[in-house]
Image (tube, helix red, strand yellow):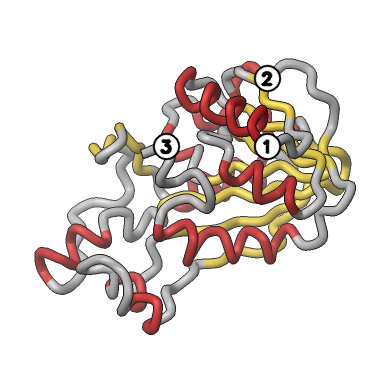
Amino acid sequence: MLETMEQYGDFAKRHLVNPVLLRMLGDLRGRRVLDAGCGNGYLSRMLAERGAQVVGVEPGQALFDFAVEKEEQQPRGIRYVQADLCNLPDLGLFDVVVASMVLPAIPEWAPAMRACVAALSPSGLFVFTVNHPCFEQLWLSWREHGEYRTRQYLAEYEIDGPHGVDFHRPLSTYLNELINLGCRLREVTEPGLDPVVAATGPEGIDAYVHLPNFLVVAAERA
């Protein structure tokens, strides 16, 4: 699994998340970037290849080891740090902090978001992606019913997934915390899948043409 996602991530990340992230981040040459919850390091490597000075933080041992091994095999100047996002060591301040698909996967998401914002320089850019709270189980529902169905939205609850547990939280939970931290929203995007790309994907992926499965948020630290 780590190897199959090593270069650009899975199908959805390649076609929905990554293009929006990279557009929002803009020119990264010479900029210090924190990849918060970097996983196997695929995004760190993409950012470094665009000229960023990248620090990747990952608590998981297997993911951290994989990322370090890839850096040793093909150095890109990435520094990997094994740490919990809620207890970041002093890494200095960053021009950009990215947390892609991290906040929905951790119970202590609010301290992690605070740590990400605290690591930003004034006017620094914070970009995070989450499963869209309105359509988290889009693929499974679409395959079974030909439409999206949900029974609850306002409650917070766990969602079992193929790689672990995610946590459902209403959209307002994330955005209000961001506002409380003194950030100014710059852009909110709900990417949809190109129908041509959907035709090449797995069964049921055409749901992503009609409804957004991801939410990408960019904000500036005041």
Label 2 is placed on what type of residue? Answer: Leu
Q: Mark 2: which secondary structure?
A: loop
Please name the residue shown 75% across and 31% down the image: 118
Of the two numbered discs 2 and 1 in the rendering, the one whose residue sits closer to the viewer: 1
Q: Is residue 153 visible?
A: yes
Q: Is tag 2's residue or tag 3's residue first in the polypeptide sequence? A: 3
Q: Position of residue 41 (x, y in %)?
A: 58, 37
Please name the residue shown 77% across and 62% down the image: 26
Residue designated by label 1: 74
Q: Is residue 201 or residue 165 the one in the foreground?
A: 201
Q: Residues within 10 Å of mark 3 (few under 14, many from 20)?
A: some
Label 1 is placed on what type of residue? Answer: Gln
Q: State the count of labels.
A: 3
The answer to whether the residue labelled 1 contacts the one labelled 3, judged by CB atoms less than 8 Å apart, is: no
Residue designated by label 3: 2
Left or right: 56 as drawn, with respect to 138: right
Of the two numbered discs 1 and 3 in the rendering, the one whose residue sits closer to the viewer: 1
Q: Residue 88, labelled with which disc?
A: 2
The image shows residue 79, relative to residue 8, as above or below, that is above
The answer to whether the residue labelled 2 contacts the one labelled 3, judged by CB atoms less than 8 Å apart, is: no
Q: Is tag 2's residue or tag 1's residue first in the polypeptide sequence? A: 1
Q: Mark 3: which secondary structure?
A: loop
Please name the residue shown 26% across and 55% down the image: 137
